[in-house]
Amino acid sequence: MSLNSALQSLSKAIEEITRIPIPEEVLPDVIGRLREQSRKLSAAAKSLESELPAGVVGERFESTSVSKPTKRSYSADAIFLTVMDRLEMGPMDALASLRGHDALRLTWRWTELVDYFSKNDIRMVVEAHEILDGDLAHVGEVRNRETKVVEIDDPIEAVGS
């Protein structure tokens, strides 16, 4: 089988799979097998791509050089001290000013925050809804539910249960 006919067969198989009505009881297996094949295809494409130089032109696609985003690091101390000095602000005003201009986004880390509060004997207030700045609660939790397909460890045992 030639490479071109293999790729055409793959395309036809994908089109056929998307047209077939799939009964709910086999849907998890179909989704799992499709993801499995998708991972294999992705790995094969990445492997081939790693060997491909930029500038190769095919019939439908071409390889190009892509620049990756610049990696930056920030000195919070230098930024805050400069803002506080130049704008004659205190630390909280500087923080609010930077956040107000979307120049700073705080990212809270749950595990570390819980640990910090615990070590410093601070009671954390968590409420079961989204909260905003100004609320008395420290954290708001809104649980999201989604259905995922996961592989069964022992398929024969699972069918019998």
Image (tube, rainbow, N blue to C red):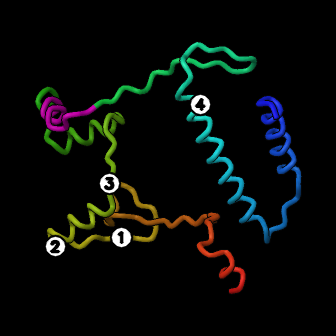
Q: Position of residue 152 (x, y in %)?
A: 62, 71
Q: Residue at x 83, y 45 (%)?
A: 13
Q: Earlier in the sequence, mark 2 or mark 4?
A: 4
* Front of the two marks 1 and 4: 4
Residue 79 vs residue 48, the one in the foreground = 48
Residue 60 vs residue 144, the one in the foreground = 60
Residues at marks 1 and 2, CA–CA distance in whole angstroms: 16 Å
Residue 68 vs residue 123, the one in the foreground = 68
Q: Quadrant of residue 27?
A: bottom right
Q: Residues within 10 Å of mark 2 (few under 14, many from 20)?
A: few
Which residue, given by chain and number where applicable, does mark 4 sit on? 48
Q: Earlier in the sequence, mark 3 or mark 1?
A: 3
Indicate the secondary structure of the residue bearing disc 3: loop
Which residue, given by chain and number where applicable, does mark 2 sit on? 121
**In screen coordinates, is 42 left or right of 126?**
right
Residues at marks 3 and 1, CA–CA distance in whole angstroms: 14 Å
* Front of the two marks 3 and 1: 3
Give the magenta range. Answer: 73-84
Q: Residues within 10 Å of mark 1 (few under 14, many from 20)?
A: few
Q: Is residue 30 above or below residue 105?
A: below
Q: Quadrant of the N terminus?
A: top right
Residues at marks 2 and 4, CA–CA distance in whole angstroms: 55 Å
Which residue, given by chain and number where applicable, does mark 3 sit on? 108
Q: Position of residue 21 (x, y in %)?
A: 88, 58
Q: Position of residue 131 (x, y in %)?
A: 41, 60
User: Which amino acid, by three-letter code, is at mark 4?
Assistant: Leu
Cβ atoms under marks 1 and 4 closer than 8 Å: no
User: Which amino acid, by three-letter code, is at mark 3?
Assistant: Trp
Q: Quadrant of residue 136?
A: bottom left
Q: Residues within 10 Å of mark 4 (few under 14, many from 20)?
A: few
**Which residue reaches farthest front?**
1
**In screen coordinates, is 74 left or right of 22?**
left
